[in-house]
Amino acid sequence: MTPRPNVFGLDRAELGGAVESLGEPAYRGRQLYGWLYRKRARSFDEMTDLSKAFRRRLAAAFDLRWPALAERQVSRDGTVKYLFALDGGATIESVYIPEQKRRTICISTQAGCPLKCAFCLTGIAGYRRNLKPEEILGQVAVVMTDAPRQQQAWNIVVMGMGEPLLNYEATVAALRILMDPGGFAVAPKKLTLSTVGILPALEKLMTEPVRPNLAISLHAPDPELRRKLMPIEERYALSDVVAAAQRYPIPRGGRVTYEYVLLGGVNDSPVQARELARLLRGSRAKVNLIPLNPAPEIPFDPPSPRAVEEFHRILLEGGVPASVRKPRGQDVLAACGQLHLKDRAAALTPSASTAPRPQP
Ligand code: SAH
């Protein structure tokens, strides 16, 4: 028996077509859209303003499925790491990060990643496939439903596994529904897409009517070093990426974020900090310094706390706003691409709760 197609993940037009194919008027599609993405119903039964007969026909023609949760781990600091098992056997990760004034969901766009950045576990583990819109949106639906009821606004960062701009159509389809006031209603300024700078796709993103914030993974102030850390530099050069990013339309006063993973003795020297400040000074830029999350598979060391402090200070003195990312969820390997490496999951610290929970 072939499985019924999943109704979760379909956009307004697709839902309109789906309900019409079942002999219902198009406005039923709008109702269905609200149930799926605003109210995040788990079954057709909950959709009480649709007739019982129509709900039966919907359930006969479609499934309503969120990605299957394979593992859920809670860190001492409240960070929750989710591992999803997708159709076909691939696994992906999402992370929930509670903070004082906000809470953030970090989502994946590919199972694995083809880019092979030298310090990134996802790249080291290899590439499986692009995620579908339902799989990208589904991560958000599961995490939002699972999180404690709180007032703080949601932030979403597309900084999990994969390169979102290598999966443009599915990623943008998901982001549209996330940012739609009639959908998940996440404010565009609360959503950040992180990319190495796939230029043709970045240009395309600039023309979208509603756009997320932009973060660029830079990691080196010069092309020679960047090439060693990020093979994609061969294809899309640092100077072109920065030039394109600076044309990205953001509201007045907004800035493009440049992520810079600090690797001890590799890209964390004062000279490199000054070079980075020169590169970005005077542009609408801010730098997010990320001390490396080390792992046995990663052939680099974290920077010393002193190097981080010095690098940060030089950027600020050089006129470039900068912040240092606090590590979160380290006891549950929530850092980067760690949980889906099964052999390592066995090495979890006992403080982490590893009990899988039924899907919310
Ligand atoms: N492909 C996209 C999004 C995923 S990576 C991109 O590269 O931007 C999200 C961020 O996590 C990137 O800035 C990436 O460089 C960083 N990252 C990857 N591995 C890391 C590690 N071991 N420690 C710290 N940051 C890491």
Image: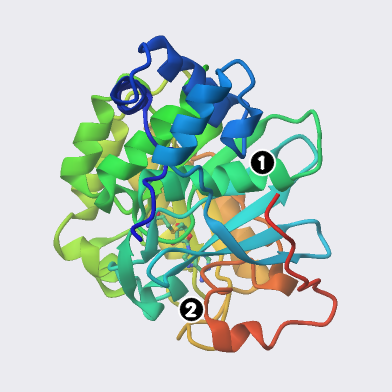
Name the mark nearer the viewer: 2 or 1.
Answer: 1
| Quadrant in the picture for the N terminus | bottom left
**C-alpha distance separating marks 2 and 1:** 39 Å
Q: Residue at x 63, y 27 (%)?
A: 39
Looking at the picture, tell me which residue is in the foreground, 357 or 324. 357
Residue 315 visible, this angle: no
Which label's residue is closer to the chain start, 2 or 1? 1
Q: Quadrant of residue 161?
A: bottom left
Looking at the picture, tell me which residue is in the foreground, 182 or 60. 60
The residue at which mark 1 appears reads as: 144
Residue 166 visible, this angle: yes
Q: Is residue 305 above or below residue 130?
A: below
Q: Position of residue 104 (x, y in %)?
A: 64, 43
Q: Is residue 71 above or below residue 138?
A: below
Looking at the picture, tell me which residue is in the foreground, 307 or 12. 12
Q: Is residue 127 above or below residue 44?
A: below
The residue at which mark 2 appears reads as: 265
Label 2 sits on what residue type? Answer: Gly
Circle 1 — which element? helix
**Left or right: where does residue 287 sit relative to residue 328?**
left
Q: Residues within 10 Å of mark 2 (few under 14, many from 20)?
A: few
Q: Residue at x 39, y 23 (%)?
A: 250
**Left or right: where does residue 32 sit relative to residue 358?**
left
